[in-house]
Amino acid sequence: MTTWITGDHHFGHANIIKYCDRPFENVDKMDNELIDIWNGFVGPKDDVWYLGDFTLGDKGAAGYFFAKLNGKINILDNSWHHDKRWIKGLIGASGFNSLSGYMPYIVPSIVVLEGASMNKDGDDIPAILCHYQFMNWDRQHYGSLHFFGHSHGTADPRHNCLDVGIDNAFKLLEEYRPFELDEACKLASQIQ
């Protein structure tokens, strides 16, 4: 089992192609390609931490895309990213637990993911997850990491801080894909 971290797919959002200069002919081709890329990396039993802006659609659209994606998806539940259109509607909805054989976990908007990486002494260090980038975060001066989305690869680089959205993945890794957690930890710690 592998742990992945990602965000900002904007499934079903045609204008994101223009806004982020994504190389797709149309929204259907983008959606299908992003699903194929996701499933090429994420296995059915993998954990995925999703940091917002999954789709601008309603709960029907969200359910459609969840059913096509591998992994157990843990998605941030907050009222200020685009997922506010559907996320509350899926909590407790009939069939929600059975989508694609996994339970998408709804978690608070700010999450401390313990054991994200190990410091030089071999101790686990936490990662702070939020849709938006923080200037300062819990245990920052003790080596904690901060992962976020929203900026689509335009955030100012900061030490121990990484935009894990797919547009930044394309910028750094040349693929619209999730970051494997250890990979994200290493990339964040390399930023000076």
Image: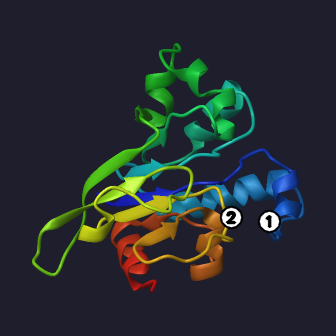
From the top left corner, tell me how far across and down residue 78 is, in percent.
54, 34
Q: Residue at x 33, y 59 (%)?
A: 127
Residue 152 has which mark? Answer: 2
- Secondary element at tag 2: loop
Q: Is residue 59 visible?
A: yes
- Total numbered circles: 2
Q: Residue 146 falls in which quadrant of the image? A: bottom left
Q: Residue 176 falls in which quadrant of the image? A: bottom right
From the top left corner, tell me how far across and down residue 141 is, in percent.
29, 69
Q: Tell me if residue 56 comes above or below residue 38 in the rendering.
A: above
Q: Residue at x 32, y 60 (%)?
A: 2
How are the residues colored? rainbow
For label 1, count other residues whose C-alpha is less than 10 Å away and answer few (under 14), some (14-19) or many (20+).
few
Residue 107 shown left or right of residue 132 in the figure: left
- Secondary element at tag 1: loop
Residue 178 has which mark? Answer: none
Q: Residue at x 49, y 36 (%)?
A: 100
Q: Is residue 174 visible?
A: no
Q: Amino acid at mark 1?
A: Cys
Report the Cα–Cα distance between label 2 and label 1: 7 Å
From the top left corner, tell me how far across and down residue 10 is, in percent.
71, 49
Q: Amino acid at mark 2?
A: His
Q: Tell me if residue 162 comes above or below residue 68 in the rendering.
A: below
Judging depth in this view, the residue of 25 and 149 nearest the camera is 149
Q: Quadrant of the N terminus?
A: bottom left
Judging depth in this view, the residue of 12 and 44 nearest the camera is 12
Residue 20 has which mark? Answer: 1
From the top left corner, tell me how far across and down residue 145 is, in percent.
36, 66
Contact between marks 2 and 1 (CB within 8 A): the answer is yes
